[in-house]
Amino acid sequence: MDDKNDRYVDVNIAIPDGVSFADLKLSRGNDGSVFFKWEPLEEICRANGISIEAFRSCHDDNVSELIARWYLEHLRKGGERDPVADEAIEEVLIEEAYGQRFSLDPGKA
């Protein structure tokens, strides 16, 4: 039970009609932080009977994982690429390739 994967539950989340990935309005701060609008995530949570607090009050990995999975599904369905999402995913892939198990806060490296 010490395996990280034992602590996670894979959940299918439906994106309601009228909510698009672009609604997040992803952007980056000068320090590299990723910013987004919470409203689309709130709507998704409401439509799926999930408390938004599962994402707001927990580690950033929860909301990052939701956004990344949504983005990949968005692309799979022919959606347009988002440069901020592409850059963030590339950073994670590089960290994983070098065995970095955590991300430092922006400006703290």
Image (cartoon, rainbow, N blue to C red):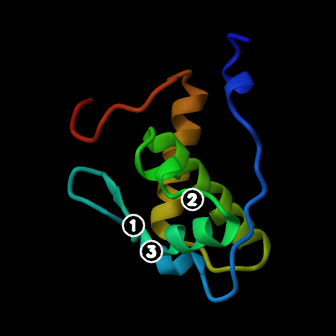
- What element does badge 3 sit on? helix
The residue closer to the viewer here, 20 or 107, is: 20
- Rendered image quadrant of residue 35: bottom left
- What element does badge 1 sit on? loop
Residue on which the image places disc 2: 67
Residue on which the image places disc 1: 36
Residue on which the image places disc 3: 39
- Rendered image quadrant of residue 3: top right
The residue drawn where x is 59% and y is 48% is 65
Query: Going by the image, does 15 lie left or right of 89?
Result: right
State yes or no: discs 1 and 2 in contact (Cβ < 8 Å).
Answer: yes
Number of disc labels: 3
Q: In this view, does 91 lie above or below 97?
A: below
Residue 105 drawn at (x, y percent)? 30, 36
Amino acid on which disc 3 is placed: Glu
* Label 2, label 3: how far apart the Cα atoms are: 13 Å
